[in-house]
Amino acid sequence: MKMAELIQNKKIGKAHTKAELQYLVEGIVNNSIPDYQLSAWLMAVYFQNMNLEETAYITKLMTYSGDVLDFSDVGPIIGDKHSTGGVGDKTTLVFVPLMAACGIPMAKLSGRGLGFSGGTIDKLEAIPNFNATLSSSQFQEQVKKIKMAISAQSQSLAPADGKLYALRDVTQTVDSMPLIAASVLSKKFASGTNLIILDVKCGVGAFMEEPHKAIQLAKLMVEIGNRLNKHVLTVVTDMNQPLGFAVGNAIEVKEAIDTLQGKGPADLIELTLSLGSLALVKAKLAANTSQAKTMLENCLNNGKALDYFAKLIEYQGGNPKVIENPKLMPQAKIIKTLKVPDNLAQNIWIEDVNGKLIAIAAKALGAGREKKGDKINLAVGIEVLVKIGQKVSKNEPFAIIYADSDTAFAIAQDYVFQAVKFSCEIIKSPPLIIDSYE
Amino acid sequence: MKMAELIQNKKIGKAHTKAELQYLVEGIVNNSIPDYQLSAWLMAVYFQNMNLEETAYITKLMTYSGDVLDFSDVGPIIGDKHSTGGVGDKTTLVFVPLMAACGIPMAKLSGRGLGFSGGTIDKLEAIPNFNATLSSSQFQEQVKKIKMAISAQSQSLAPADGKLYALRDVTQTVDSMPLIAASVLSKKFASGTNLIILDVKCGVGAFMEEPHKAIQLAKLMVEIGNRLNKHVLTVVTDMNQPLGFAVGNAIEVKEAIDTLQGKGPADLIELTLSLGSLALVKAKLAANTSQAKTMLENCLNNGKALDYFAKLIEYQGGNPKVIENPKLMPQAKIIKTLKVPDNLAQNIWIEDVNGKLIAIAAKALGAGREKKGDKINLAVGIEVLVKIGQKVSKNEPFAIIYADSDTAFAIAQDYVFQAVKFSCEIIKSPPLIIDSYE
């Protein structure tokens, strides 16, 4: 078999055979296929797609292209949660301890932020001494002991995906449905999890803007899960405005701590309860959604979820005292509140909070990175205190900027005023959760 | 500017700006764009195409990406002829001396054979001591002196095309209309010619099977010529059956010599006269096609064209005595004639002579190469003595195989019997020349 044949077959729209996909993934792993052929193939896939059978099979091959973690001694169900990336998305920080507290062990490998999307690992590193880079054996050991762990991706898992992703990143072939699905799921499956809750974001603050594409991706990933005997649950959610209030790192951890005490922003709580109840029902720990929601709310209100978070921090070397004293995390030098302009009418509604512009503002402050390896500032960020459709008054605070320099503050403030639009007419609140699939 | 942007723009179907194309071609020449990005771009071009403006501009940029030969001291018109490649296509060997004899200086850079397509340079090397690799200055000097030269491509002309073509070859992006046109024409323009006759082949023995695609390419190349102030004339011709009788190297040279004496196969003479009369009229050396044809026929019949071929051979170090004694060229050990089977009806017509199968037969004998750098056997080949639509009789010779081993003979014979199909019903002769454009 030759790579040229594979490229040709995909170019003319043929489905790959299993043997072809095997040749491909082996060639990626042992470096026998040159990058220039892989990238031509990737572009052909972008245009000609892969069908469900091909996508499921390449996902499987990529899963087994390196080490596969084994949690069989922990229990039959190992949970995982993934978001396709958004602005202010700190759900994982709440979700992992909450699920563990409710009886689902969570083995969560996460990424760092890139572009306008934040990363769980960066956020956790705002906690003093938190070790977010566990070895595979440390990771497995911890899940066994305390039923949860959050760590950065390991290079030894799904190496075929690692190499392919790096190439997609520089050849404009990231936005291919089958390639996204195979990439996300192979990493999850290789990490030994089998109950995977995927939050597919859509809107201006998400990688995938159009809802119909997010829905297509969500359904595709569920079907791949079915074919490979894994529980894959997907929820398509709105990411036009940021999730919760905080967009940054330390300030997002603080918001997660609030939420774990039942005091978080309404949208973040809504999302957490929705994802959690789907998982609990699927894991047969709750008979139905409403029973599941009660379980989850109890865990948040009685302090059990927060205790689990404290335990997670402690086990990973961090200082759990941040829970009582968030100021132990990096603090910004300048903290300024923005107020609703007083030259507006009496009745004001929030017409828009553009998530992408808020992300750009946060990046301007130093909270995000332009390219891999860039250092980020964990202290800075923005809290947008209002949501689309909310009624506000003149002079009411609507955002807080956490900056480390006056220049950065000024730039961020400009973006925030571009992002938040006020209206004199009633604006409807958009739904957060668009649909879910399993 | 970044290559990723160019890939993205082409991926979504945008036309490139001149600045983008300039960035691209410069990046190819100075190696600043990695191959994996170029190949992703090539595949995006395959799917999204380039418009006439883009194609003409990239052709111009590729033309000037290296040295450009200057024949201004030879005359205002410098002719060139190119075929997109076929089976048994020895037209250049006849055409170059014939045109020079009629007053159009010919500066012809040629390729070697690859796949099922033969190469003029290989054929010429069947002539003892013929030097087909002239330096640029030797090439220019010879055109000045004797009004013609045929040499292998120089690496210093259109280097952007050289690099891009090598990449297209291994990424299945050869068959893109704008990329073919830009590649062919940039090489021609860089070689300093301005009256270019292009023979675009179509059919099973051609690179481009479908006539409508060949026509599209032919028209595109004419339009690029118009935009860049060059005379580009194109003829679309049938390449379902081989051109002429001989398919090989030495045996094709012999057939070319016959044709230069007016004794060649009818189809080869027809093509030569058609291409030649277009050129003579365009160069204003003849008032119209019929006057041009008379000029050409005279040159073939009075020995002038053959004298020019002798001069070409002599100037390039070869032995012109091959003209009287073709046996000075490599001779095959086994020469066997195939006859029309005698178990057929009385009246037999030739239904098919499959050019591709004949080419495969010739390659099996050793006359062609599988990949660049392969050695070829100049002595071997096949003469198919019949044409589609021709009436033949039982036991009449229809092919001669020139082989160097019994095994190779047996394999070739098998292919020839697959290629040539006999019918008991009248079969119409297909037209050779489909259309011409200027």
Image (cartoon, coloured by chain):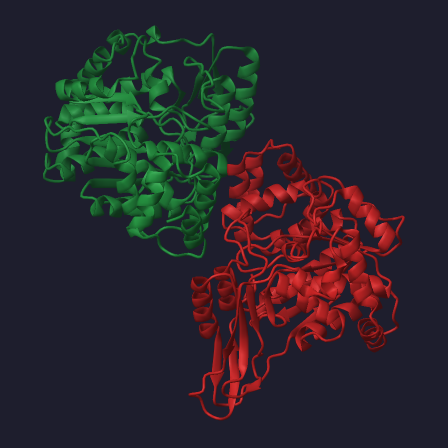
Chain colours: A red, B green
Q: Nearer the viewer, residue A414 or B43?
A: A414
Q: Nearer the viewer, residue A36 or A165?
A: A165
Left or right of B48? Residue B409 is right
Q: Can residue A377 be seen? A: yes
Rendered image quadrant of residue A407: bottom left
Give the image location of residue B289, x and y in percent: 16, 39
Left or right of B182? Residue B231 is left
Image quadrant for the N terminus of chain A?
top right
Q: Residue furthest bottom?
A: A346
Q: Can residue B347 be seen? A: no
Image quadrant for the C terminus of chain A?
bottom right
Give the image location of residue B254, x and y in percent: 32, 16
Left or right of A164? Residue B389 is left
Residue at point 15%, 18% (across, down) = B146
Give the image location of residue A67, x and y in percent: 75, 40
Left or right of A145? Residue B171 is left
Give the image location of residue B343, x and y in percent: 56, 26
Residue at point 24%, 33% (across, down) = B190
Task: Tell me: residue A208, above or below residue B152.
Answer: below
Question: How many marks can you see?
Answer: 0
Task: Tell me: residue A182, above or below residue B184.
Answer: below
Task: Tell me: residue B22, above or below residue A388.
Answer: above
Residue at point 42%, 44% (across, down) = B210
